[in-house]
Image (cartoon, rainbow, N blue to C red):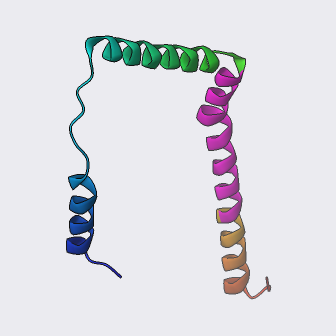
Amino acid sequence: MTNSGDLERLADEALAGLGPRDLSRADADALRARCHAALAARRRRGAGAAARWRGLYDRVVEPAAAALLGGAVVITMIMRALAVFTGRGA
């Protein structure tokens, strides 16, 4: 197992071979345009009905299912504890 000093040394050695890279104005503009296009495409994909259903599922369905399951577990535990303490068996 390596310690943090070894990892830092390895990272320093790996980074030493990298030189600075300055982008020309045209390259920077092209890169910025590609990034904006990728973000716009992601927003368009997420704006559909599937995203709305996913939001509903995350906010309503999943918490309700977890609450029901948790409630069932608690009720079962209470019933078994009562059965043990009253001597009626589980």
Question: Residue placed at 32% from the left, 11% from the top?
Answer: 26
User: Residue 16 location in percent, x, y?
Assistant: 21, 54
Q: Is residue 37 magenta?
A: no
Question: Residue placed at 70% from the left, 85% from the top?
Answer: 84
Q: Quadrant of residue 43?
A: top right
User: Residue 53 location in percent, x, y?
Assistant: 69, 25
Quadrant of the image containing the C terminus: bottom right
In this rendering, is residue 29 above or below 64?
A: above
Question: Residue placed at 66% from the left, 78% from the top?
Answer: 81
Quadrant of the image containing the N terminus: bottom left
Q: Main secondary structure of the magenta part?
A: helix
Q: Exactly how many numbered labels are in the figure?
A: 0
Residue nearest the viewer, comparing 22 with 1: 22
User: Residue 48 location in percent, x, y?
Assistant: 67, 16
Q: Is residue 37 left or right of residue 5?
A: right
Q: Is residue 6 left or right of residue 30?
A: left
Residue nearest the viewer, comparing 37 with 87: 37
Q: Quadrant of residue 83?
A: bottom right
Residue nearest the viewer, comparing 4 with 55: 4
Question: Residue placed at 65% from the left, 23% from the top?
Answer: 51
Point out the stretch of residues depicted in magenta: 50-73
Q: Is residue 19 left or right of residue 39?
A: left
Q: Residue furthest right?
A: 89
Residue nearest the viewer, comparing 27 with 31: 27
User: Residue 15 location in percent, x, y?
Assistant: 24, 53
In this rendering, is residue 40 above or below 61?
A: above
Q: Is residue 56 magenta?
A: yes
In this rendering, is residue 90 above or below 25?
A: below
